[in-house]
Image (spheres, rainbow, N blue to C red):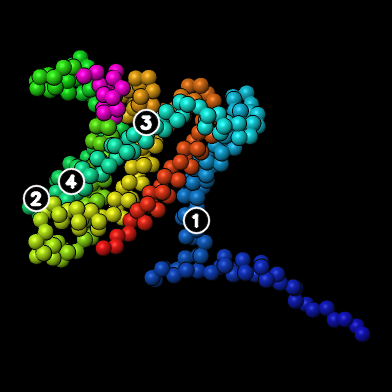
Amino acid sequence: MRMIESDQATVDPTQAGKRAWLHRRLKFGSVSVPAWIPYAFILPFFVIFCVFMLYPIVDTFIISFENWSASGSQWVGVHNYRLVLTDPAFWTSLLNDAFILLVQVPIMLFLATLLAVALHSKAIRFKWVFRLLVFFPVLVDAVTYTIAFQLIFNTNFGILNYLIHLVGFGTVNWTGNAWAARISIFMVVTWRWTGYNAIILLSGLQSIPEELYESAVVDGAGRVKTFFKLTIPLLRPILLFCAILSTVGTLQLFTEPYILTAGGPGSATETPMLYLYSIGFQNYNFGLASAGTYILTTIIGILSYLQIRASKGGDYHA
């Protein structure tokens, strides 16, 4: 039996699907554009993300397993991680940060909550002016305001010591004494971030129904009791969010201690970021610094997870 060949060429379904997609058009109102146009608009973001974020993340992870130098690199496995985890200076820097987390962050969040409640009050006029002033410290460059505080904390001619002298106390060496240096870091960080957290908490306060406060007044609850029994519990999800941000920010603290105290006196105010900076950019041991970076990232992730678990995701059940 003679086979009759078809005049029609065999069409690959995959290729046909691609051609159909390329010729497909999307309608936006009265405008019709090719289907690939939206992808062309988001392509620059993915290119920038891959070049400036994804590639450094992957490359840093690879370097963390190498003894890296300008002349070459040698694979050392987890040796860098072992060196960081057994370095007492690394644990000292973590303890310094833990002290900030346990002391400064709760005080800052409490002050931010009080400030948010004050800004939410109906008795305040021109609220937008006060909100702008509260948020203003975040707009100031970190280096600029830290240098300004360096002048304020100056032992010889700083305005803070001048005010202390007026009330009859002696000179305080704000950057030369370990505890004074820690307090100076606390004050600078608190000045910077209290207003920022207050604005976030203010958005949470605005979502609380006024009927709850009216019911509390009818039940005879005063302002203090309403604040602790109603406002704080209802703000738990927002407080959790601020606590996680503060935890991440504290473990990444660098500019303030670097300019104000240079991590001193001794290592009293050295943070993990200062520790990694000295290893990477002063000793040029980028393999060790990269390993420390991933250890610090892991610690941040664990602490954030524990905060979410401890607060049950910020949920409140009366």
Of circles 2 and 3, the one toward us is 3
* Residue at (17% x, 23% y) in the render: 160
Q: Residue under label 3, please give it.
A: 96
Rendered image quadrant of residue 11: bottom right
Q: Which image quadrant for residue 247? A: top left
SS class, disc 1: helix
Labels 1, 3: front one: 3
Q: Position of residue 147 (x, y in %)?
A: 27, 25
How many tags in the picture?
A: 4
Q: Amino acid at mark 3?
A: Asn
Query: Foreground: 12 or 191?
Result: 191
Disc 2 versus disc 3: distance between alpha carbons? 39 Å
Circle 4: element type: helix
User: How far separated are the C-alphas under marks 4 and 3?
Assistant: 27 Å
Q: Mark 4 vs mark 2: which is more N-terminal?
A: 4
The residue nearer to you, when weighing 13 against 214, is 214
